[in-house]
């Protein structure tokens, strides 16, 4: 077992640069296949596999060429990118070419090599991290700088600790995954900050199947996970609230114009519902960004109520 203090957790900048290198590797593989196909006289043609019509509008693109573009993208992800990432990250190097260049690697929670099955799960969980404005990549879900897919797959991205006396992570924790001043903060100990129950705010250093205080099976998580969820929900709800506010303002303007010229109008009831929804999302988002836990608590209770039905 690798000693946890012999490594430092990789920052966002190193991971982003490694990802950029790996993207270049996948593109190079695609280019090599294209030139190989070209050398053979194009035995495999895009137009022979999919119906291609030069799109003249977004609607035309979605109905004619988009299925072929999507199928090509999925084929590249499954046949090139997936084997590249999963095989290399589960190999003895524990790293892709980009991670090797950045001197970082993927490991389990104890710093050991991961299996191909876990590398496979981690790769496909990246889809969840990439959605929702890529917040699953840039938000840390523990003091060990785990992205969303790292936390679910129980993996770490680490590098050799070149300054062990100064850079003794996880003494430096961050809501985001950066090393920049203002993002990082010093914590008192060398271990993660423990666990917290979102429902009753009970905190403890030990992990258990449910909250020891209120007994709820869900919502007893690492403090870093709660911090990450607050940031993600805060950003998302604030954006949704802002968009709904703009849409409501536009609808009200249209309604006033309709009243003036006697045209069929949007009911005020619909406008009222839109206004309340925009206010609810904006309030929840700003509260979550301010560290308030009630938005997450409300989501858990709603999810629990739906699960019991």
Image (cartoon, grey):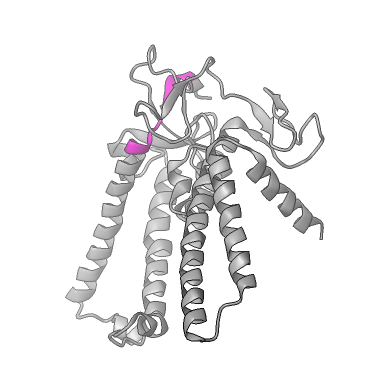
Region in magenta: 5-14
Judge by depth and name the residue closer to the eye, 192 or 241. 241
Q: Quadrant of the C terminus?
A: bottom right
Q: Is residue 269 above or below residue 27?
A: below
Q: Residue at x 35, y 87 (%)?
A: 51
In the image, farthest residue toward the front: 260
Residue 291 at x, y = what percent? 57, 35
Q: How many marks?
A: 0
Q: Residue at x 39, y 46 (%)?
A: 88
Judge by depth and name the residue closer to the eye, 229 or 95. 229
Q: Is residue 137 left or right of residue 37?
A: right
Q: Say if the magenta span includes residue 9.
A: yes
In the image, farthest residue toward the left: 39
Residue 65 visible (yes or no):
yes
Residue 53 at x, y = what percent? 31, 88
Judge by depth and name the residue closer to the eye, 54 or 299. 299
Residue 161 at x, y = what percent? 37, 21
Q: Is residue 42 above or below residue 152?
A: below
Q: Residue at x 62, y 32 (%)?
A: 222
Residue 74 at x, y = what percent? 42, 67
Q: Say if the magenta span includes residue 152.
A: no
Residue 151 visible (yes or no):
no
Q: Is residue 43 above or below residue 110?
A: below
In the image, farthest residue toward the top: 165
């Amino acid at each position: 077992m690798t000693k946890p203090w012999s490594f430092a957790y990789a920052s966002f900048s190193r991971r982003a640069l490694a990802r950029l290198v790996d993207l270049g590797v996948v593109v190079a593989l695609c280019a090599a296949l294209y030139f190989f196909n070209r050398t053979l006289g194009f035995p495999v043609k895009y137009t022979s596999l999919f119906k291609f019509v030069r799109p003249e509008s977004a609607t035309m693109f979605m109905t004619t060429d988009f299925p072929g573009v999507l199928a090509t993208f999925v084929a590249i992800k499954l046949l090139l990118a997936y084997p590249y990432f999963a095989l290399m990250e589960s190999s003895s190097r524990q790293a892709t070419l980009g991670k090797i260049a950045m001197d970082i690697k993927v490991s389990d929670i104890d710093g050991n090599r991961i299996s191909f099955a876990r590398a496979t799960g981690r790769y496909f969980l990246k889809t969840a991290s990439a959605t929702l404005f890529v917040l699953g990549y840039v938000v840390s879900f523990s003091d060990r700088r785990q992205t969303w897919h790292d936390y679910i797959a129980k993996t770490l991205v680490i590098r050799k600790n070149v300054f062990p006396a100064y850079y003794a992570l996880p003494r430096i924790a961050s809501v985001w995954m950066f090393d920049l001043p203002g993002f990082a903060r010093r914590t008192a100990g060398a271990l993660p900050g423990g666990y917290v129950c979102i429902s009753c705010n009970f905190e403890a250093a030990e992990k258990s199947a449910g909250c020891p205080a209120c007994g709820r099976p869900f919502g007893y998580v690492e403090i870093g996970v709660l911090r990450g969820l607050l940031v993600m929900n805060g950003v998302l709800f604030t954006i949704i609230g802002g968009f709904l506010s703009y849409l409501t303002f536009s609808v009200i303007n249209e309604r006033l114009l309709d009243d003036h010229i006697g045209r069929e109008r949007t009911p005020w009831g619909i406008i009222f519902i839109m206004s309340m929804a925009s206010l609810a999302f904006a309030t929840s988002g700003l509260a979550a960004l301010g560290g308030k836990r009630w938005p997450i608590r409300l989501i858990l209770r709603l999810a629990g109520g739906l699960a019991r039905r």
